[in-house]
Image (spheres, coloured by chain):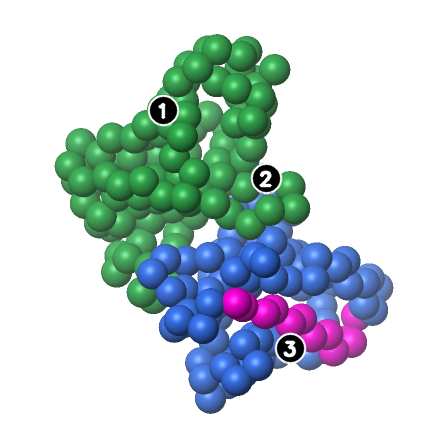
Chain colours: A green, B blue
């Protein structure tokens, strides 16, 4: 099993550009999440999904969109990139939601907006 | 006040030392707690859950004190490979990650 795979690993965007961070998992997990991690800050939840066709906002959803058309894939869309979106983005999945506390994270995508 | 607070460190300790990290939480409704480990420029990985009675996994011991609202992680006989950032995580209706405590073990 590859686990959770994120692409790209690194990306530089100009202000106002758009892009999609891809995330796929092969563990047949229903729950998937997108977090961002900024220096000196804890992981912040952007969006999450409890199953195909269902998504919901987390703590910091502004400027982002997601979709969940399949169990495996959970892409994160950035529209009109801003410098404040410079961050490391982690996709994660879990089998039983957050009750067990065990999330499986991808390796992260480092995004810089200039 | 942050919901989960940690001393950012760094804690610099020699190999073989015992080191302890504390984490405080403000939401008394938090039900469960966990420690994650994050290596430099890598993703977080679950290290261990924290049970009310305390629990041990090899050289690692986690404790929960609900009265004082803090969680601790004790690492005995530190190894160079223990160098990482340790994230304290609390769960009420969702997981709340602390900012992490950095540990550097030197030879």
Q: Is residue A35 visible?
A: yes
Q: B29 above or below A5?
A: below
Are labels 2 and 1 on one chain? yes
Mark 3 to mark 1 CA distance (whole Å): 40 Å
Residue A91 lies in the magenta-colored region: no
Q: B58 above or below A16?
A: below
Mark 2 to mark 1 CA distance (whole Å): 18 Å
Report which residue position mark 2 lands on: A38
**For residue B41, what is the image quadrant?**
top right
Specify the label residue B7 is tagged with: none
Report which residue position mark 3 lands on: B74
Specify the label residue A77 is tagged with: 1
Residue A31 pos. (x, y %): 26, 49
Q: Chain of mark 3?
A: B
Q: Residue at x 81, y 67 (%)?
A: B13
Q: Nearer the viewer, mark 3 or mark 1?
A: 1
Residue B16 lies in the magenta-colored region: yes
Q: Chain of mark 2?
A: A
Specify whether B13 is left or right of B25: right
Which corner quadrant holds the C terminus of chain A? top right
Specify whether A56 is left or right of A8: left
Magenta-tinted stretch: B15-26
Specify whether B75 is left or right of A14: right
Residue B67 pos. (x, y %): 52, 84
Q: A22 above or below B73?
A: above
Q: Is residue A2 visible?
A: no
Q: Chain of mark 1?
A: A
Q: Residue at x 53, y 12 (%)?
A: A15
């Amino acid at each position: 099993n590859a686990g959770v795979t994120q692409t790209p690993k690194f990306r530089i965007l100009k202000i106002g550009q758009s892009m999609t961070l891809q995330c796929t998992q092969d563990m047949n997990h229903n729950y998937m999440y997108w977090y961002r991690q900024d220096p000196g800050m804890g992981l912040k939840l952007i969006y999450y999904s409890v199953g195909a066709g269902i998504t919901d906002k987390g703590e910091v959803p502004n400027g982002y969109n997601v979709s969940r058309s399949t169990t495996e894939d959970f892409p994160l869309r950035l529209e009109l990139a801003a410098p404040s979106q410079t961050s490391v983005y982690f996709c994660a999945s879990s089998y039983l939601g957050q009750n067990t506390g065990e999330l499986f994270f991808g390796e992260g995508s480092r995004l810089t907006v200039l | 006040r942050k919901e989960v607070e940690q001393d950012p460190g760094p804690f610099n300790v020699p190999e073989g030392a015992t080191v302890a990290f504390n984490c405080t939480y403000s939401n008394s409704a938090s039900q469960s707690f966990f420690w994650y480990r994050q290596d430099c420029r890598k993703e977080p990985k679950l290290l261990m859950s924290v049970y009310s009675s305390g629990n041990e996994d090899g050289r690692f011991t986690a404790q929960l004190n609900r009265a004082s609202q803090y969680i601790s992680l004790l690492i005995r006989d530190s190894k160079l490979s223990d160098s990482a950032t340790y994230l304290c995580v609390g769960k009420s209706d969702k997981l709340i990650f602390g900012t992490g405590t950095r540990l550097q073990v030197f030879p």
